């Protein structure tokens, strides 16, 4: 180490030196036991040089416990809450659209029709009579 390194830098360098072999050994020994999520977490921790997180992942693999940190749960919960809020807004907008459509004159007219066959037969007769009137003019 250089003499101008601070104690904190030296400690960080030592942590990294301990981190590298641990990570390399773990990826050689257990790649088939890592879930895709765990692989992603491990790669992210390695990129951040988060030794504690890598050790937590290693410990979870060794003990078979489910890996979840409080920050993951909080992030997931926050994401789900935002998604739920967006869905509630979408539901409210759709309900308003439904009410607007149900108040429309066309919808109200359609609701009064008891038999669509009779309605279209009557409409056809009216259009044919109108056509005949136009032709005779």
Image (spheres, rainbow, N blue to C red):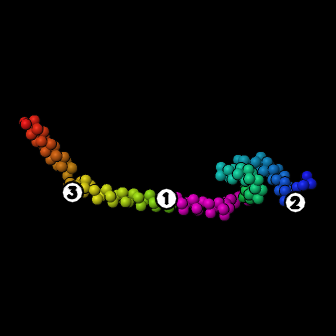
- Which residue is pictured at 34% across the width and 57% down the height? 98
Specify whether 110 is left or right of 71.
left
Residue 86 at what x, y percent from top left?
49, 58
| Proximity of marks 3 and 2: CB atoms separated by less than 8 Å | no
Callout 1 crowding tier (Cα within 10 Å): few <14, some 14–19, many ≥20 = few
- Foreground label between 3 and 2: 2
Based on the picture, tell me whether residue 55 belongs to the magenta stretch.
no
- Residue 112: which disc? 3
- Rate crowding at label 3 as few (under 14), some (14 to 19) or many (20 or more) other CA atoms within 10 Å: few
Q: Residues within 10 Å of mark 2 (few under 14, many from 20)?
A: few
Seen as rendered, the residue at the extreme left is 136
> Which numbered disc, 3 or 1, marks the residue that appears first in the sequence?
1
**Residue sticking out furthest to the right:** 3
Percent x, y for residue 70?
Answer: 66, 64
Q: Percent from the top left, x then y, of residue 64? A: 71, 58
In the picture, the disc for residue 7 is 2
Q: Is residue 137 left or right of residue 88?
A: left
Count of picture labels: 3
Instruction: Give me the residue at 54% from left, 62% from top.
Output: 81
- Toward the front, the furthest residue is 4
Q: Earlier in the sequence, mark 3 or mark 2?
A: 2
The residue shown at (69%, 53%) is 41
Foreground label between 2 and 1: 2
Residue 7: in sight, yes or no? yes
Q: CA distance from mark 2 to mark 1?
A: 49 Å
Query: Element at badge 1?
Result: helix
Region of the chain picked out in magenta, as a range: 62-83
Q: Which residue is under mark 1?
A: 86
Quadrant where the C terminus sits is: top left
Question: Is residue 64 covered in magenta?
Answer: yes
Instruction: Identify the residue shown where x is 17% and y is 49%.
Output: 118
């Amino acid at each position: 180490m250089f003499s101008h390194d601070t104690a904190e830098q030296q400690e960080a360098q030592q942590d990294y030196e301990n981190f590298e072999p641990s990570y390399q050994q773990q990826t050689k020994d257990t790649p088939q036991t890592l879930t895709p999520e765990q692989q992603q977490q491990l790669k992210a921790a390695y990129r951040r040089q988060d030794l504690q997180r890598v050790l937590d992942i290693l410990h979870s693999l060794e003990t078979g416990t489910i890996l979840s940190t409080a920050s993951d749960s909080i992030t997931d919960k926050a994401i789900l809450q935002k998604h739920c809020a967006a869905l509630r807004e979408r539901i409210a907008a759709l309900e308003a659209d439904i009410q607007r459509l149900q108040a429309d004159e066309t919808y109200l007219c359609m609701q009064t029709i008891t038999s669509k066959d009779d309605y279209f037969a009557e409409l056809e007769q009216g259009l044919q009579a109108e056509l005949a009137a136009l032709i005779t003019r």
